[in-house]
Amino acid sequence: MISVSGVHKNFKSGEQTVAALNGIDLQVGKKEFFVLLGPSGSGKTTLMRCIAGLEKPDAGSISLDGKTVFSASPRSNVPPEERQIGMVFQSYAIWPHMTVAENIGLVLTHGPARLSQNDARERIRHALGLVQLDNFEKRPARLLSGGQQQRVALARALAINPKLLLMDEPLSNLDARLREEVRTKIKKLVSELGITVLYVTHDQVEAMVLADRIAVMAHGEILQVGNPYELYRNPKSALVAEFFGSMNWLRGKVLDKYCVETEIGRLEVDFRGEPNGNVVLGIRPEDMKIDASQEILRNRIEGTMAHSTFVGDQMIFEIRVNDTLLTAKAMPDGKKPEGKVSIYFPKEKMIVFPDISSD
Amino acid sequence: MKGRWLLVGVSAAALLPVIGLLLVIFWMGFWQSGPGEPVVYTLNHYRNILTDSFTFKTLLNTLGFASTTVVVSLFFAIPIAWLVERTDLPGKELVFTLMAVGALVPTFFTAMGWVFLLHPRIGVVNRIFVDSFGLAQGPFNIASIIGMGWVEGLGLSSIAFIMIVATYRTMDPSLEEAGRIHGLNIVKTLRYITLPLTFPGILAAAIYVFTIGLSAFEVPAIIGMSNKIFTFSTFIFYKMQPLEELPNYGVAGAVSSLLVVLALLLSWWYFKVLRFSSRYAVVTGRAYRPKLVELGGRGRLYAWIFLGLFFLVAKLLPFFLLTWAALLSYFQPPSWAALSQVSLRNFYGLPWDLLLAGARNTLLLMLAVPTLTLVLCLAISWVILRSDLKWRIVFDALAFLPHAVPSIILAIAAVFVALFLVRNILPLYGTLSILILVYTVSRISFATRIINNSLAQIHPELEEAAFAGGLRVLQVMRKILLPLLKPALVYAWLWMALLCYRELTMASVLVTNQNNITLPMIVWGLWLGGSLNQAAAANLVILVFMLPAVLLYLTVGRRSRLEEAL
């Protein structure tokens, strides 16, 4: 559905040139819910705006549904209004001088569809029905609440029957409770309608809930593409791993094919690839098992419980081993271990990256 | 408690003259006879406005003049505002600075320049046409309603620009993008989205400029009066200080009253439109970076040509012509023969004693008026925003009046009061004090607005914390509010000082002798007396005096504050 290859985009601010996109390649399939995830300044919004046609890349090409909409050489560019895209902006961009119906109707009657007033009215009613805003047609847009504006923006984007729906952080201006509710509704709605969605967010939970696949971006590059489980379990870099939740990092030296001598002791590891020399070893807090038994088995290391916190659905432990503080999570069982504990590091749950900082 | 009543008292004392002067004007309009004679009241003057053909023609002149002003100023202001706010044009800050400084260039200065350029008889352009094509008469006439509207409009395009820039800035660019992406082409996006959204802002600017145009004095006085073309302001001036007959206060009062009512209606409309347009201003949560329109090489070239032409026509040409005129003993178009006559004789021949007296008075005004205004307006703003006084809405309304009432009318009312009502108690007539008082009254709206905007951004809890600590109202004012308001106060002080420097409208009525003469009045006096070249020379001299103050303003001033005050 979307095919992006070799896209570069630079911005000039004063004398400086900032590379917002640095050679992006991306394929999004039909009916896929695809999320661009990254911190602010990672280039995710710029990439979306290039696909929309609101920014022109400096190099590369973009095609939608098999049709080239932008190419740097030979030069070609389809203006945004001819790309048949629906878009929900972060600010919603609801036209304040119009009613709800006019907001949706303007693009139906004056856009390429050129619907008659009667046909447009039917489409407006249908679109408002999809977002559960029936009978809101006559409401002046500036009297809408934030959540209602968000739904009108979605209705407007869906009313033109787009092949592709772009959403730029559409939930970031809603309060937390509403966000969760709307998130589920959006997911359900677009899968019923069977349209392709490209969704930009900086919130990894939102990304994991919504996405079929996620592209993690940073510094104008795509770090990794995959489904939420892959990204969580098999991050290809420390940066991606950190982005999907907290990690305990241990520096170490590879001893042989199975073993790493870390700062807290020797650990057996499942290597992917063949790293050698200095490595960092990562394990998520919920993957470490803690018990008070002093039985020393493989991959068990002894530490001292420094602090434990009960937060309802889980316990959070801080454990000191030598000078290193580790964080572990577990289901609460009413016990509060103290003193010496033993930590078990399952070897299949540990990931290893070459240690770049020690070079 | 004492401090509180002191502040209320000071505000009341500042605002009473406003309402007093206004009532005097309405009262004047019903006087059949002049002062000193037994008072007879009549409605004749009002009847005359519509029936007397000369008065009626003045009414039409004024409307035509103000309309032309609007068209000309918007013609330049809209594209320049768009270029500065929505395109990637390089050097935007410079353009903005030049526009702000442009608002400070005295209008009488550019008006004289345009006379030298386009006067039907002596104007350079017309002379060239007459000489090269053997025409009997030059093709252009600056001494016409359109001509005067053109000059006034060029001057006011700075103000219009500053207002329209704000409109473009507060519009969220994604509103336009949402149109494009869902299938509207550029033209339809402009037609259905950009234009309706910016229209209220532009309409507000148009009403504002029209209101100023209705009562503008300097251009009609410099260009129109000697050619017997009158607008309301010069008509009123003429009735107050006629050359042959006795002053006719009744007619002046009636026409002034009409003008005041018109201006009040327009101001009411202005605020209605402004409130409407602010509903469209989208404040997005994050600091969005609006996507700027890429002009491209050719677009930039056209943009710079347009800007260059504007500055050339609005400021540089008049300046060149004035300089040329100042170097000649009688005005003639540039030629080799004329070049040999160039000398500094006009500068030597200037009435330097008078200029020094004028400089002293002007300097005193520049120091006294902004200071006095700020003291009074601090009290007014405090009463409006911080007191729990039931009547504070009245203070708010009264503080707005000087904005709507044409300043020449304030001056006329003040002269009337000084001459006939308080002559024996307060000898104000012909003194510098009356200038200080009237200038101050006329600036109350501007200063109150600036202080209100800043005070509204200071959380009242900052003061309450000080009250809780035992400080009293005046101590809180001095220790908490003054330091926090300082940037706004400094800015307002400088801007008002500069406006004092170029003020001619009120001075034309209030200055009556050498004791209270100001620099602009000397220039105007030379001009009215027919010494056009000496007037040009004097103009250059006072412009040089003004430069240090302008530079100070530029180093201290921030562009946003001017927008707040309009």
Image (tube, helix red, strand yellow):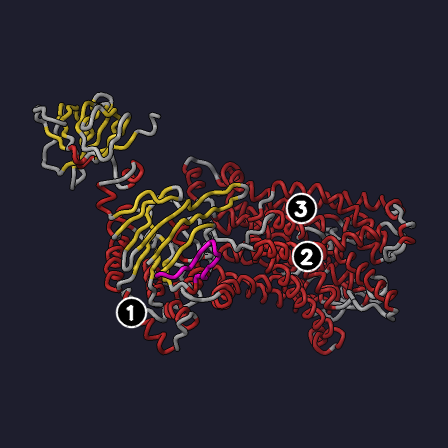
Please say whether residue A82 is one of the residues in the magenta stretch: no
As drawn, is B257 to the left or to the right of B564? right
Q: Label for residue B277?
A: none
Residue contact at pointers 3 and 1, CB within 8 angstroms: no
- What residue type is disc 3 on? Ala
Part of the protein shown in magenta: A65-80
Please say whether residue A79 is one of the residues in the magenta stretch: yes
Q: Residue A310 location, x and y as percent?
A: 17, 36
Front label number (2 vs 1): 2
- What residue type is disc 2 on? Phe
Does B437 appear above or below B413? above
Q: Label for residue B497?
A: 3
Dot 3 lies on which element?
helix
Identity of the residue drawn at 33% across and 67% down: A161
- What residue type is disc 1 on? Asp
Measure the C-alpha gap from mark 3 to mark 1: 59 Å
